[in-house]
Image (spheres, grey):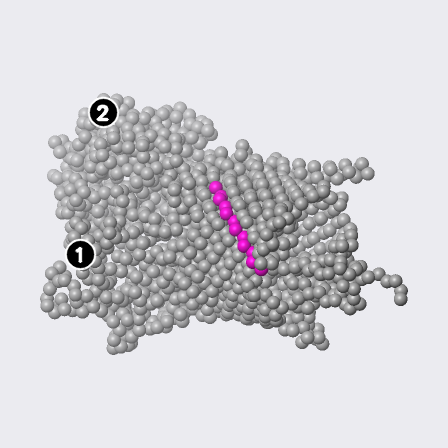
Amino acid sequence: MAKNSLKHILIPVLIFSCLSCTKDFDEINSPKTGAVTTEPDGLFTAAVQRGSMTWYMYDRLQRYTANQYMQYNTLTGSGSLDHYEPSYGIFSDIWDRSYGDQSWELAPLFYISHTIEVCIDRENPIKEGIARIWKSYLFQRITDLYGDIPYSEAFIKPLPKFDTQESIYIDLIDQINIGKNLLLSNGNYESYGRADLIYNGSIEKWEKFANVLLLRIALRIINVAPELSKEVINSLKSGPYFTSNDDNNKMQWDETSSNIYFRNPILVTEVFNNTRVSERMINFLKENSDPRLIQYAKPARLDGEYRGLKNGMDPNNQSVYDLEYYDRYSRLGEAFVKDDGVTYNIHYAESCFLRAEAALRGLTNEDPEELYNLGIRAAMEMYGINDDVNQIDNYINQPEISYNSIMGLEQIITQKWVALCMNGVEAWIEKRRTGFPIFEELEYSGPINNGQFPRRLTYSASERRLNPQNLQEAIDRMGEDEQTTPVWWDDY
Amino acid sequence: MLFCQNRVTGIILDSITKSPLPGATIQNLDLNNIGVTSSFDGIFSIEAVNGNRIQVSYIGYESYSFIAVNTSQKIEIFLEESSFKMDDVVVTALGIAREEKSLGYSVQSVDKEVLSNNTSVNFINKLSGQVAGLNISSTSNGLSSSNRILIRGSSSLTGSDQPLFVIDGLIVNSEPGENFGSQDGGIDYGDPLSTINSDDIESVTVLKGPGATALYGSLGTNGVIVITTKKGTKGENLKVSASSSLITNQAFIFPDFQNVYGRGSKNTFTKYNSQSFGPAYDGSNFINWLENEVPYSPVFNQMESFFRDATTTSHNLQISGGNTKSQFLLSSSIYDAESIMPNSNIIRKTLNLTYSTNISDKLKFNSKISYFNQDAFNRPNLGGSPDNPVRNFYLMPRSVKLSDLTDYISESGRVITWDGKTEGSFNQNPYWGINLNTNEDVRDRIIASLDFNYDVFPWLNAIFRAGWDVISDTREKRIAEYTVYKTSPVATFSHSKSNRSISNLDFILSAQNSWDNFDFSLTTGASRINNSIRSLSSNGDDLANPDLWVINNFKEINSTQGISDKRLNSLFSTLNGSWDNKLYLNLTFRNDWSSVLPKVNRSFSYWSSNLSWIISNSWDNFPKSIDFAKFRLSLAKVGNANSLTTSALFFNYTPSTGHLGQPFTRLPRIGPNSYIKPESTLAYEIGLDLRIFKGRLNIDFSLYQNDSSNQIFTAPVASTTGFQKQWINSGSIRNRGLEIILKSDIVKNSNFRWNLIVNGSINDNKVLVLSEDLPILILGGSRSGISVQARTDFRSDLLVGSKFLKNGSGQYILDEFNLPQIERDENGNSDFILGQVQPDYLIGFINSFDYKNLSFYFSIDSQLGGSIFSSSYASGSAVGTLQHTIDGRKSWINSENARMELGYSQQEWIATGGIPISGVDEDGNQVSGFLEPERYWSRMSGVNEANVFDSSFVRLKEVSISYNFPERYFENLFLESASISLFGSNLAYIVRETKGFSPQSSLSSGKAQGIESFAFPTTRSIGAKILIKI
């Protein structure tokens, strides 16, 4: 009887304790389709691929915005950006997709910042060094576009404060130097290898890239912080910089993927059939018998002529809405729209022009003319133009083109503009700094900015809504949140 | 003469059917309360002397008293069925049966009669209007579409607000359909409830408030729907029942298209124009878009002719039997339904076996296994999908003949469609859509359970229960090569498979005892629920061999695997006490340990206390006119963490396809939160239950307030955090409401009975706060700029969009072209509250009439106070296909002709006809004149306010008439009974405000309801059913 009662009590107690234990909960609730730890490689791969601008970012930032400002391309239908009017939606998109992970965009700034954390956690100084250099490249671009931006607290605080562009630039120089030192003093660690879509993990090439980037940064601040600029250039001595087009920092696109985020972004956007090469670009190429003409543009469908479409056309002109009207103008050429195409982040030609400018300014002992010529040659060779029939020499020897120290800066920056074609962002930033190349006034400009050349992008609407206090602080420092407000280094 | 004891003998009969009632209790109140029960034939004999008071009582019948008179004659006693069974037993949480009068909260049951004659795939449609406070919003997505089921309003901002479904004590899968509610289309795969065969259901009980559901703890926030299935009955011979029904479904609300003007714009025909603002039909010959010369005349009823009258057949067979020891029931059904859309149908088969046996006097065993198989072919593509045929009819220029589109494929394999394009167009040929871009899904489901019920002592009972619910889904979707709207011309295919399972394990001990007038029972138990999902979905691009739709025949394949596990352990206890049939108190307590919560917050407790006070038993001199009066009071706390997944807690790295063979590692897009807590609802409820006029009228009131706080949702964050959104625990929602249930036997005599039930409820929803920095949360929306939002101090189902700019006296402020314009706030936004999605009032009227063997039933349900935005109406206005767009066209054309004759330019001319407009200009001056209809409607289509409709309706939901053949027909046959019924459902909207679509046409059954986008026409079902029993 007693035994029986015991059984009656014991069984329920056993069952209750069994059903309420939580021993397995950690295992049950562990993520099964994602990892809680990772290696930096996959993050870095995403950061370099997206940082090189896949189609959506290319479309918003280059094709619609900077490429129109810099008169590389014109979009049919005459939109507001081509009249130096802001497009808040596009400017917000560029910001939001650079910082935050939106759908397919895999925000490069978030990814590269996180890569560094994982590298530190995994104790790999080589990978960390490369990541710090690439992060500096990406952050320089975003601060050059907007001015003061969240930098030190981005991805760390729920409401990140905005840092001044000056403090960001000072830190970028430090970061690149830290990155370089990590690369040079840790030979035993494994690099990225193929996960590095740009340099296949080559320490030597990343070091060269770091030097070119430092030179770019130094020249950007030459007017506002000449001492720092000189200090950076002195520390670089003679690089090593890029020595050939093999050193180009570029992205090779996938010609077979059906996913447009892996395809050549210029080719992807070309299917809309609403891009034409700008009149200014085609005329400049034609006037100087530039062998790049047939590379940069296609003959017009209507009559086989190379003809550029003017930027800033009057939208009241009815013909801008007539699709057949655009058959008279050249679409983008083979240099840009190849299936197995590449896009350039920084190329050899640019590095030559940067060095030429530094030399021109007397900051180095190099010969500006030699570097200028080297830059033109590199820019042509990059698109497969060789000097078999002296076409490069002939080009360089034309009186308008050949180096002339009085016009030196304009010539260098104008040639850089031609070489950077379809990478409007860098060309636009350089025009804001130097004023070159010189463009005519637009035929039509919108009422908001009255044809004033844009000097920055306005901040994102969602940042304004969700991080209002920090954003307002930055605006109070900078002036107004307008595209005419100059950024810190812009004293032109 | 022998001394013989005085006895009264007689027979007890049902007053209507005149059939004997076995087992009735007969008591002699004046002779030590001695009692006997009636025999199988209803016969009794009880000791009594002249003048003794004899009382006859029988469950479910009114008691009957009489004074004994010594007589040798057998007396006949007719008992009347009681309208409201005071001793009704209802199934409460955890399957505990309790007397309804003892409950301190509101429950409402729906019995099998209501569920019979089911016309739709999903039995849940039947419940609309049957239960006060239960809001079933059906979507208009064709066969087997999902429903949103809300009990007492929405308590969760972004989490699930679907109630918990419990079948025979087993918690089953009931998650609503997937998130198909996008304007870009999608497919409604129905909810898991649609696999349940309504013929197997004995009753459905709705536990509404947290007081009733607190025993389900973190699962109980949204109410519980308890389904009891049919079982074999004791001591009966083998019983067979078979039924067959034939139903026809007919689309019945179509858009009101215009048949006056054909293709074109500005009164001019052009071949590939996509509008219907062309010239008026004149019957003359013209060259159409196919370069054929045809008369220029209207084509009527094209959309009507595209859809078909669809037939549904359903057959059901039930065999049950057993002896006093063991019983079984076996049922099987097949349901075969065509969709009103050609080339689309659904077939469902079910098999169900229940078996119970008494292993010993003390130990009972019950078991059940059900298998469902459902195969749906070609469910419609919804919303803005170009493959949605409804979209085509709203947009297709009116003079285009549907018969010109039946040959949908050209010799080169490209589409023939009315805009002349073979690529880069969204104007799909509807026949290509339904014939080539097809889909198919198969669902297999097994629900199995068993329980042992052991009477340890007379006062102690133990139940051990285990059950499984396993759903396996396979889905395929094909998009043919050269489909006109695809960015690349290659064929695409998706194949996905998912397995969802829930397993339950319960152990429950119940003890009861009583002292004097006090009765106690204590139930305590433990349970474990495991949830698991495994899925694999593959997408293929580019067919290698033509027409071979298997995933390995595709050149590029991408697969995604999903794994998710959850476990919920619980301990619970409930104490019931009653005193002298006057006061009943019920206390419940439950502690949950949930694996989806972070370690520190895993353990949560929930409780309820419920009081029922039978006022009518509490005073001797209680007014006789009130048969029964009860007051209820309930206070409870329940929770909700059901929608949480591991991604909410952990910073997760996900591998994904990368560039040139180098994989990417992806970071989370939503910031995790490792301190998340379950949502919790604190609920108050009071109620009153009154029965008067000898039980002929029953009125039941409930008043409730549910405050749901700690809302779990993802709030948008600045992109500089790296995330789009962040999981947070904030905000609270209040739902307050009143429910009234009125039941009455309006007429009741031996031949005729008219029973009326009215269910009415009001619910008021308010967002008390979202979070400190977040006044607005967008829950969903469409490309037309309309969205569904929750806003602090407003509701959680606001329809928000653009509205007209008007001055203080309500006049339009017109723009430079005299067109009404959109109002914008200082930031340039045009987000104004235009309405609420959910109705304020729900009312159902249920009438049943019985006359001899004939019964007649009809129900009306209605909803008042909600709104719906129609993007179809907006589109049809913009392109001029709808009837209302013809206003003013003729007079405008006359005005234009006069202008051109006189050689005036547009600027110089003052129009003499068109759409009259009046308002003020920007400076406040009065302006009036005429507008060009084409421009006017183009503007109107872009203002959301102009396309929002009141979604209130009154609907004739069900009508049925059935006839039971009198038993005498079968005396010499093997049949026991037979009946035939004719029925119809969703028959007509008596009142509705929507134009060309039904008020219940929401695109989604998710949170973003209230948006209609090219919804399928609603269907009316009419059918007949024959039921025989052997």
The reply, left or right, for residue A108 in relation to residue B458 is left
The percent position of residue B326, horizontal first and vertical second, equals: 74, 57
Q: Is residue A255 magenta?
A: no
B622 sits left or right of B438 in the view: right
Q: Is residue A416 visible?
A: no
Q: Secondary structure at mark 2?
A: loop
Q: Nearer the viewer, residue B327 or A319?
A: B327
Q: Going by the image, does B442 lie left or right of A294?
A: right
Where B889 sits versus A207, above or below? below
B26 or B932: nearer the eye?
B26
- Which region shows up in magenta? B696-707
- Determine the residue positioned at 18% across, 33% down: A434
Q: Amino acid at mark 1?
A: Val
The chain containing the residue under callout 1 comes to B
Which residue reaches farthest left?
A: B903
- Pointer 2 residue: A225
Membership of B704 in magenta stretch? yes
Classify B1027 as above or below A369. below
Q: Residue at x 34, y 63 (%)?
A: B394
Residue A405 occupies quadrant? top left
Residue tagged by mark 1? B927
Quarter in which the C terminus of chain B is drawn? bottom right
* Magenta region, main secondary structure: strand
Report x, y in % for residue B508: 67, 44
Q: Residue at x 14, y 62 (%)?
A: B910
Measured Cα–Cα span from mark 1 to mark 2 = 61 Å
The residue nearer to you, when weighing A331 against B214, is B214
